[in-house]
Image: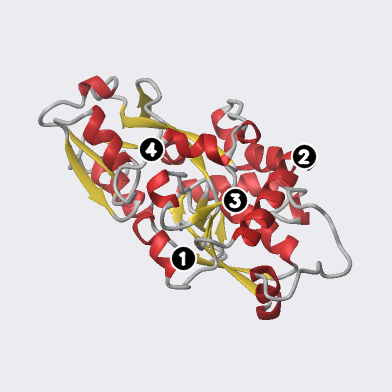
Amino acid sequence: MRTNNTRWVTGGLVAVMLIAAACGGGGDGGGGDGAGSGDSGAQPQFDAGTTMAELQDKGKVIIGVKYDVPPFGFKNPQTGEVEGFDVDMGKIVAEKLGVEPEFVEAITDNRIPFLEDGTVDLILSTMTITTDRDAEIDYSRPYFIAHGRILVPKSSDIKGIEDLTAGTRVCTALGSTYETTLSKQAPKAELELVDSYSECTELLGNGAIDAISTDDVILTGMIIQDDSLHMVGDRLTVEPYGIGLPDGDSELQQFLDGVVEETFDNGAWDRLYQKWVGRYTGEPADDPAKMTLDQALKLFPCEETC
């Protein structure tokens, strides 16, 4: 068992990630590990007045990512840099813009406000595409497909969603899709809503909750840190991730769609998956290239904002 759960990001998991990155040839998502396009030469050209041209003039793109969700976004305590699948995807986007990426922490509950108030230019923060969110912002086409699961200690009697009955305490992130999923599929369970998933792991470690529910790839990061935990039950949901962008910017959306599609075509996506996810799960990924944005939106019909 963990003796200090607040060290979740700064402890053993980061060491594992560092070893993996070294084996993979570097921690960045660009040409250093073969994840980027490898293009070089003249800066790409964009029409004046587009967001892409404005970002070039600024010389950087500010991207909101998670800081405590391995293997998608976590802060390396040795370098102070953030790393992970989402971070490397952000570096690829920046490369295609011909600018430098700047990463800021975006937790589940502030991702959309950050886009709306201009704190960030883009969001790459394990954000599921939903119709409610699409009413406030826009998305790129899906770049990853996760699935909802339940995480418990191996000693737990909980074997699936049907065991989340009255008196059981389940943690998930405030503003996540699991607020709705759990209220529907486990209506008698007590929800513990927190700002970050590292808080869930701390609560599970000290016995304050009985289970965590979120995306399987996020739960995988928790298991890497603590092998006394495991996932139980069937998949609860399909969770397609998209790059979040300001509402109504169709040119930026088209550009991001092209970047994502290129990672599918040139093998960069496969390399990122193996580097950050596949080497830990040993499982093939659901292919996001086979899902359109419209198909993703149909998975989460509008419930609140439209």
Q: Secondary structure at mark 4?
A: loop
4 or 3: mark nearer the eye: 4
* Near-viewer residue (55 or 85): 55
Q: Residue furthest front?
A: 306
**Location of mark 2 (residue):** 265
The residues tagged by marks 4 and 3 sit, at their Cα atoms, a distance apart of: 39 Å
Q: Amino acid at mark 3?
A: Leu
Q: Are marks 4 and 2 in contact (CB under 8 Å)?
A: no
The residues tagged by marks 1 and 3 sit, at their Cα atoms, a distance apart of: 30 Å
The residues tagged by marks 4 and 2 sit, at their Cα atoms, a distance apart of: 30 Å
Whether residue 48 is visible to the viewer of this picture, yes or no, is yes
Q: Are marks 1 and 3 in contact (CB under 8 Å)?
A: no
The residues tagged by marks 2 and 3 sit, at their Cα atoms, a distance apart of: 27 Å
Give the residue drawn at x 70%, y 80%.
57
> Any mark on residue 301, and which?
4
Give x and y (percent) for residue 240: 50, 39
Whether residue 216 is visible to the viewer of this picture, yes or no, is no
1 or 4: mark nearer the eye: 4
Give the residue drawn at x 34%, y 47%.
176
**Location of mark 3 (residue):** 18
Of the two numbered discs 1 and 3 on the same chain, state the one appearing first in sequence: 3
**Location of mark 1 (residue):** 115
The residues tagged by marks 1 and 2 sit, at their Cα atoms, a distance apart of: 29 Å
The answer to whether 28 appears left or right of 43 in the picture is: left
2 or 3: mark nearer the eye: 2
Give the residue drawn at x 42%, y 72%.
117
